[in-house]
């Protein structure tokens, strides 16, 4: 009998202590929160090429004073150089960030905030409303168009070509890959294109080595070592990897996969999606994005 | 050789990676603080909770240890704001760090609860009887006799749990906290993965160093405990 009563007393004491400690923890964490909140990236570079944008903003500034712009949280994987990645201080940079900043300047009612997310958290973040929009080499698909708002205007494109050992110059297209080994991350657009090719041409099928999160440099190393026969690499990445590694490989001049990029927007944000697409069309039409493309990719992807 | 392993890149990477160490340790300490409280609570419930409470504790501990950490993390990070919205407590912005640390805290609390329970049960029942014989209440016996001994017994297991937690925190990066592993992934992307081996070996060594320090610490605490245990008055 006595044992039980004391047991209960211990339990209540423990519970009180736990509740106290928990509430204390909460208080402390709340205090820390603002320091962790991300702020919008700098807009210095994107302003250079768009003096017209400055004037329109000045005209509308009297409206702006009365209304705080609404924050749009933009999620992106910061491992997609040159589209979205980080500088030495972990600040998120890249073509997409400059593009979004240029659009931000044109949208009086909205302001963008960027969040670095990994692939595993990307789509669930958009679905649950933790972010309002995704960007960064995202391709359109019927499934995505059914689930999210996807602006009809493409924001850019990327070209990939085959990389083979220096001595192999006759492998330039998927046709030449029959029975050959090629590594690819199943999460990528190119993987679906390769799968499609294999289904449509079973007699000329390539052997895809499925590797999640494999880097472009790693696939090129595999080609150099003979662990793979070919690799599918972004045309813009090849030279930079070679500058670092100078592997005994070459890149074919033929573009095998062309991927068009888009953004995905929370389906409830119809008004924003429209404003966004209008602004996107503007920055493409007036050459702002062509300039940014030259800056980040070395060529104009809108030509 | 330079093509496959650049020693200079490797050396330069170490201090850069270390700059993310505070973020890793912050998640570990926050999760450990909250996890210890929760773990103690559920260990107590399991041992002394009676039929209902002990069953709740069993279910809780088994879920927190059984469900993949990333599932618990996502449930808290994405679920809690939605539940709050549903309850009419909508906020424009939810602080990231507490939500992420809470996921780790829940996970580690399951392990800590079991560490504590096994340590408590490892204390010989005779100790209770001895305390009883000199007229201590059960509460006094717990505080002065059982608890100090259980603490010492728990140290090795708790040390293991903390080591596990340190490595698990690399998952925080999927939600945007730049910890050690996250820093390596970001740096890796800056040159398309050209120096991946160097980076990952460096990050592996840093995790190892952190765990070594922790192991030494655990050993030292254990020794202190041993001394007080076998000291003759």
Image (tube, coloured by chain):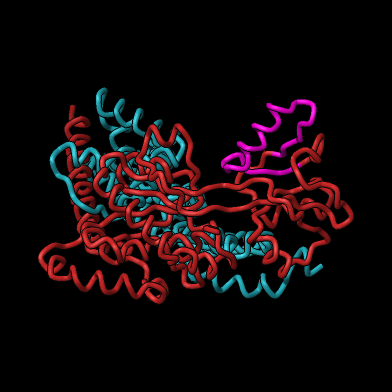
Chain colours: A red, B cyan
Residue B116, position in %: x, y? 39, 43
Residue B217: x, y in percent? 50, 63
**Residue B81, x across and y down, in percent:** 25, 44
Residue A151 versus residue B95: which sits nearer the camera?
A: A151
Q: From the viewer's side, name the closer residue of B69 and A184.
A: A184
Q: Residue at x 43, y 46 (%)?
A: A122
In this view, A108 is above or below B99: below
B136 sits to left or right of A42: left
Q: How many marks?
A: 0
Residue A185 falls inside the magenta stretch: yes
Q: Which residue is drawn at 32% across and 31% down?
A: B57
- Segment tinted magenta in the rendering: A182-209
Left or right of A29 on screen, residue A42: right
Q: Residue furthest left?
A: A66
In the image, residue B4 above or below residue A186: below
Up-down: is A153 above or below A114?
above
Residue at image position (28%, 44%) is B142
Q: Report the front residue among B93 and A155.
A: A155
Outermost right residue: A167
Q: Quadrant of residue B126?
A: top left
A158 falls in the magenta region? no
Indicate left or right for A206 with A153 as reference. right
């Amino acid at each position: 009998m006595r044992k039980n009563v004391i047991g209960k007393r211990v339990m209540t004491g423990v519970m009180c202590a736990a509740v106290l400690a928990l509430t204390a923890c909460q208080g402390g964490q709340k205090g820390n929160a603002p320091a962790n909140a991300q702020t919008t990236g700098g807009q210095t570079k994107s302003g250079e090429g768009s003096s017209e944008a400055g004037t329109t903003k000045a005209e509308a500034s009297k409206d702006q004073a009365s209304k705080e712009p609404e924050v749009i949280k933009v999620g992106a994987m910061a491992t997609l150089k040159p589209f979205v990645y980080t500088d030495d201080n972990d600040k998120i940079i890249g073509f997409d960030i400059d593009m979004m900043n240029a659009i931000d300047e044109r949208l009086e009612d909205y302001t963008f905030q960027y969040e670095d997310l990994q692939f595993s958290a990307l789509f669930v973040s958009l679905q649950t409303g933790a972010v309002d929009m995704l960007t960064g080499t995202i391709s359109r698909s019927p499934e995505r168009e059914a689930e999210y708002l996807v602006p009809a205007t493409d924001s850019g494109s990327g070209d990939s070509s085959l990389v083979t050992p220096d001595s192999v110059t006759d492998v330039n297209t998927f046709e030449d890959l029959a029975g050959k080994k090629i590594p690819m991350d199943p999460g990528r657009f190119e993987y679906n294109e390769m799968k499609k090719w294999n289904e449509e041409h079973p007699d000329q099928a390539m052997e895809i080595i499925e590797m999640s999160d494999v880097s472009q440099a790693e696939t090129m190393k595999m080609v150099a070592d003979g662990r793979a026969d070919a690799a599918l690499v972004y045309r813009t990445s090849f030279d930079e990897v070679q500058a670092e590694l100078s592997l005994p490989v070459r890149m074919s001049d033929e573009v095998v996969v062309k991927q068009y990029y888009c953004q995905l927007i929370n389906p409830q944000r119809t008004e924003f999606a429209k404003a966004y697409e209008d602004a996107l069309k503007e920055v493409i039409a007036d050459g702002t994005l062509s300039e940014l493309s030259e800056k980040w990719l070395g060529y104009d992807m809108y030509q | 050789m330079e093509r496959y392993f650049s020693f200079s890149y490797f050396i330069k990477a170490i201090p850069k990676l270390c700059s993310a160490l505070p973020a890793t340790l912050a998640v570990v300490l926050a999760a450990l603080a909250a996890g210890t409280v929760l773990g103690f609570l559920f260990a107590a419930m399991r041992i002394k909770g009676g039929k209902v409470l002990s069953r709740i504790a069993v279910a809780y501990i088994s879920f927190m240890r059984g469900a993949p950490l990333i599932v618990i993390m996502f449930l808290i990070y994405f679920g809690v704001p939605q539940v709050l919205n549903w309850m009419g407590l909508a906020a424009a912005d939810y602080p990231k760090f507490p939500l992420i640390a809470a996921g780790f805290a829940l996970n580690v609390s399951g392990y800590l609860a079991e560490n504590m329970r096994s340590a408590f049960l490892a204390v010989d029942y005779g100790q209770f009887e001895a305390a009883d014989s000199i007229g201590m209440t059960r509460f006094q016996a717990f505080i002065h006799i059982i608890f100090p001994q259980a603490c010492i017994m728990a140290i090795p297991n708790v040390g293991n749990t903390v080591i596990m937690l340190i490595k698990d925190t690399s998952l925080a990066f999927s939600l945007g906290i730049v910890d050690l592993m996250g820093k390596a992934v970001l740096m890796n992307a800056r040159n398309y993965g050209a120096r991946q081996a160097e980076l990952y070996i460096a990050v592996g060594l840093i995790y190892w160093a952190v765990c070594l320090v922790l192991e030494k610490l655990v050993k030292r605490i254990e020794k202190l405990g041993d001394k007080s245990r076998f000291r003759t008055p």
